[in-house]
Amino acid sequence: MAKLAILASGSGSNFEALTVALRGSCHEVCLLLCDRPGAMVLERAARLEVPARLISYKGRPKNEAESELAELLEENGADLIALAGFMRLLGPELVRRFRGRLVNIHPSLLPAWPGTHSIERAFAAGDNELGVTVHLVDEGMDTGPILAQARVPRQGDLAATEAAIHATEHLLYSDVIIKLLNNIAEKTC
Ligand code: GAR
């Protein structure tokens, strides 16, 4: 058994997909860390009975918030950390401390369209092929070694394209994370 911690800021659909997928494995989501009071991901965590903590970044230096975050990850025994819509760039100290154990999902075929509003920008630019990337986290914005990508064809409108990309994210992220957790636990459940 290996333990996954998830960092999220928003709706939490990837958090929920990962949590549900791990319940069919021998691994567990040990902790949700969220940086936004009132984020829907906190409601999902309560419903799914996943321990959750809010990390406040407001009115304090970023490295202080990140030290608290790092301590919680260690106290809770996180073997792997999945960023699931965590909309902050991690500081270099945090990246160094957990290098190789931090994974991110991004809704584009990186290196295309890093940053925010990636689906909208790709759609507006007329891309016919969009997609999803799962990668290890380094000090950059949506950079770092790519672990997996999935292509998603452009749909009739933006909403349908977003829905297709999110559905693909949920499958791809669960698949990659379970494989990484299996490697950590050195067995397949
Ligand atoms: C997801 O589409 C994820 O790929 C994206 O935020 C969304 C979170 O959705 N992440 C990034 O853009 C990272 N740069 P969710 O809260 O429903 O999981």
Image (cartoon, helix red, strand yellow):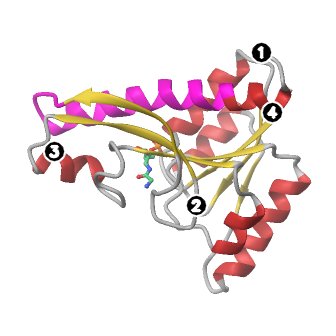
Callout 4: 10 Å neighbours few (<14), some, many (20+)? Answer: some
Q: Position of residue 79 (x, y in %)?
A: 81, 43
Where does the magenta region start and end? 154-179
What residue does disc 1 label?
188
Asked if the magenta segment contains residue 172, the reply would be yes
| Cα–Cα gap, marks 1 and 4 | 10 Å
Q: Find the residue positioned furthest to the front.
A: 145
Q: Amino acid at mark 3?
A: Phe
What residue does disc 2 label?
138
Callout 2: 10 Å neighbours few (<14), some, many (20+)? Answer: many
Q: At numbered mark 2, what does the secondary structure look like: helix, strand or loop?
A: loop
| Cα–Cα gap, marks 2 and 1 | 27 Å
**On the picture, is 29 further left or further right than 167?**
right
What residue does disc 4 label?
184
Callout 3: 10 Å neighbours few (<14), some, many (20+)? Answer: some
Q: Which of the two labelled residues, at mark 4 and mark 3, occupies the earlier sequence position? A: 3
Which quadrant would residue 114 be assigned to in this image? bottom left
Asked if the magenta segment contains residue 169, the reply would be yes
What residue does disc 3 label?
123
Q: Amino acid at mark 4?
A: Ile
